[in-house]
Image: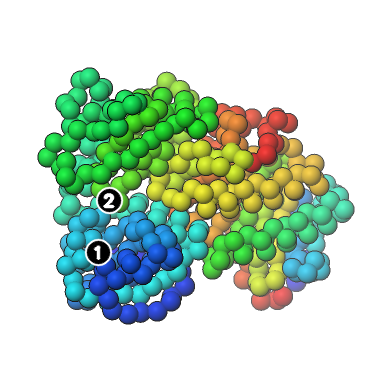
Amino acid sequence: MFEEVLNKFIIIEGVSSATIIRDNGELVESQKTGDVDDSQLAAVISFVLEESKSMASKLGKEPLSMVFIEFRDHILLSAPLKEHIFIVLIAKPTANIAQINLELKKNRERLSQVI
Amino acid sequence: MKKMIKNLPEGTSIGEMRASLQWILSHTARFAGLVLVTIQGSHGFILINMGKPLVYYFRHGQNVLKGHTAYEYFQSQPFIQFELRKYTALELTLALGIASAAEPAPKQPESNKTANGVTDKVLAEPEKSSAPETISESGNNQVALEEDEGNQSVYEMDTSDYSVFAKETVSYLGLPGKATMPQDDDNDPALFPHVPLRTIGKLLDTKKTDIGDLILGQIINLPGVLAVTIFRRGLNVLSIGEIDPDNLVDVAEDLINSAKGLSSVMRTGPFIQVTLQIPAGNIIIAPYYDEYVCILTSPGINLGQIRKIIRELPGNEPTEKTWEEP
């Protein structure tokens, strides 16, 4: 089920990886192309988790909908699916962000239901 | 009105009670948030930051009271039914932006005239304008006032500690480095760099000779943009819009550090921008000259439009020197 949904992101041109993780670092599911190094991916995931928690506490009651970080060579999009569970997408900057956002909106509820 | 309150951050309800306006103001010295007011079935609010009222607003049917007029109305009531809603720093920033971006009251054309009056006063040549509208030069902090001399307060501006960029912007806008600027409304803080969006947008839009300033003007005038702040090394350099820049800079710094940490573990190339999306709006941060620009927007703004502007900001070319300590 996860694989099917994550594939919807991977097939978008430019998307390098789509990963679902728990906030304790446990990997739920991951789909990626060969462009992303595993060690880098693990570092990115733990970093995103830590910063998301930190930001959530700073914002108080305001729930975090999405964090989008853009670099020259990569973009990273992180969004909570459910309490303690996040999806992290890594893509090239030429990827269609609107399409990624659309897939996220379409599949977020579906993903959170099966988690 | 209901839509206005609905758009404001929810905050944390502390409780409800009845009291006079003076009691409310004297007992909210350590309170930051919203005072939701109900008078004879109609609603309003006071936005307070640690005892300092930032916005007064009240609506009865089609009649909208803002600023000093609303204050006077509240003061005329022996008792006001109100609810206290505590805000975080970010909620307060967003609420202030939303409240200041609300449409002007239909029966208060004076507010529109006030905005134009501020613009006119800022652009006026000191030697050409009449005494009441002159912005005084350094060393003379008195602004002669005509009819409203007893009612207008003033702000002082001193750019001696501004960054090069901020000083150039002040100069570009024709504002003296040290001046006393008239304040037209209690809720229209004309203290530069905290200039109301409509004023700075109009000022920058009329000058199209510098691409950097034109782009800044474009950002401010974009629909949904609530505020823009330039910061460096944790310090606010220039703020445009009615926000608490220090709190926003605090959040922005965290985001910058997050992005910096990511680039240390991935081959990402130079940092372009980071966007934090929450239900109440968006926070976008990007390098800008030797500083960073932080843009606060309402939820409905077109992110694609913002991204395009960010990518075209001068000083945002993807070079290795992009990373500086925020």
Where residue B256 sits: x, y (%)? Answer: 65, 46
- Structural crowding at the residue carrying mark 1, measured as other residues with C-alpha within 10 Å and reported as few (<14), some (14–19) or many (≥20): many
Where residue B128 sits: x, y (%)? Answer: 20, 20
Q: Residue furthest front?
A: B139
Q: Earlier in the sequence, mark 2 or mark 1?
A: 1
Mark 2, secondary structure of its residue:
loop
Q: Is residue A101 above or below residue B36?
A: above
* Residue type at tag 1: Phe
Q: Is residue B285 above or below residue A108?
A: above
Mark 1, secondary structure of its residue:
strand
Depth order, front residue of B316/B46: B46
* Residue type at tag 2: Asp
Q: Chain of mark 1?
A: B
Residue beneath disc 1: B58
- State the residue at coordinates (40%, 79%): B15
Q: State if disc 1 and disc 2 touch (CB < 8 Å).
A: no
Residue beneath disc 2: B186
Camera-nearest label, 2 or 1: 2
Quadrant containing the N terminus of chain B in the rendered view: bottom left
Depth order, front residue of B67/A55: B67
